Amino acid sequence: MDQELLELIDSCKRGKSRAQRELYRRFSGMLFAVSLRYTNSREDAEDVLQDAWVKIFRHLNTFSRNHSFEGWLRRIVVNTAITHYRRQLKHAYHADIDEVHATPADLEAFKDLDYTREELDHAIAQLPTGYGTVFKLYVIDGFRHKEIAEMLEIDINTSKSQLSRARKYLQDVLAHMSLTALKTTES
């Protein structure tokens, strides 16, 4: 970690408002992108991010210089988004569906297809909330199933099945996108 960032963090710990504004300016874009990944709307992402910044400044004294500051910030945003997700689950109807597994043949069918970043982001955004949360935690942020299970207060096998379902769902969305694109080019 560079000396300038360490000094900025120390100034924030001392309650210097100019340093806090600079820290916010430096990291708010990245953290908003993380927040958006775990929420269903821009408004929810803004709420999550606001709550996360309050936690960041409240707990800045607990940050250890032996760790990645960006990683520490991301973790706070992810945990805040998960708390937001849990609150919303209490008010939402949650239907259980049958187990769905992607087969090697399913994976092979999509092996040579290329998608743009925007297409992948669009497909991921269509994932149902439970699938999407586990998929993003596992695939994008690199958490293990045990960590995901603890964060979401679910069984490890539920995390694994949600990931499997998310992959299958994504395959279906991407297949539909490919068919639509193919029909458009054939017209």
Image: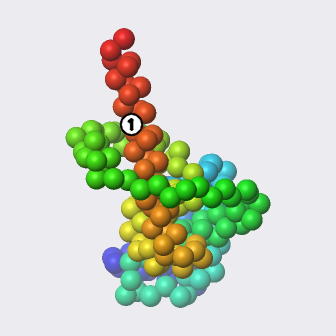
Looking at the rendered structure, the secondary structure element under dot 1 is helix
Question: Splitting the image into 4 quarters, where does residue 178 fall?
Answer: top left
Q: Which residue is found at the position 46% from the left and 48% from the top?
A: 169
* Residue 184 locus on image (x, y percent): 38, 18
Which residue lies most toward the front here? 98
Q: Tell me, yes or no, if residue 134 can be seen here.
A: yes
Crowdedness of circle 1 by 10 Å Cα count: few (<14), some, many (20+)? Answer: some
For image coordinates 74% across by 65% down, the residue present is 90
Q: Image point 59% across, 83% down: which residue?
A: 59
Q: As rendered, which of 169 and 96 lies closer to the eye?
A: 96
Q: How many numbered discs sit on the rendered protein?
A: 1
Q: Which quarter of the figure has residue 4? A: bottom left
Q: Quadrant of the N terminus?
A: bottom left
Give residue 176's position: percent from left, percent from top: 43, 33
Q: Position of residue 61 (x, y in %)?
A: 55, 87
Q: Is residue 119 above or below residue 10?
A: above
109 relative to 171 in the view: left or right: left
At x 45%, y 40%, the residue is 173
Q: In this view of the protein, can residue 50 be seen by the observer? A: no
Left or right: residue 49 compared with residue 123: right
Which residue, given by chain and number where applicable, does mark 1 sit on? 175
Q: In the rendered view, would you say 73 is above or below 89?
A: below
Nearest the camera: 184 or 26? 184
Task: Identify the image quadrant of residue 144.
Answer: bottom left
Image location of residue 43, percent across then percent down? 67, 51
Drawn side of residue 83 relative to residue 141, left or right: right
From the viewer's side, name the closer residue of 2 and 181.
Answer: 181
Q: Amino acid at mark 1?
A: Ala
Identity of the residue furthest to the right in this view: 91
Quadrant of image for the C terminus: top left
Q: How is the image coloured?
A: rainbow
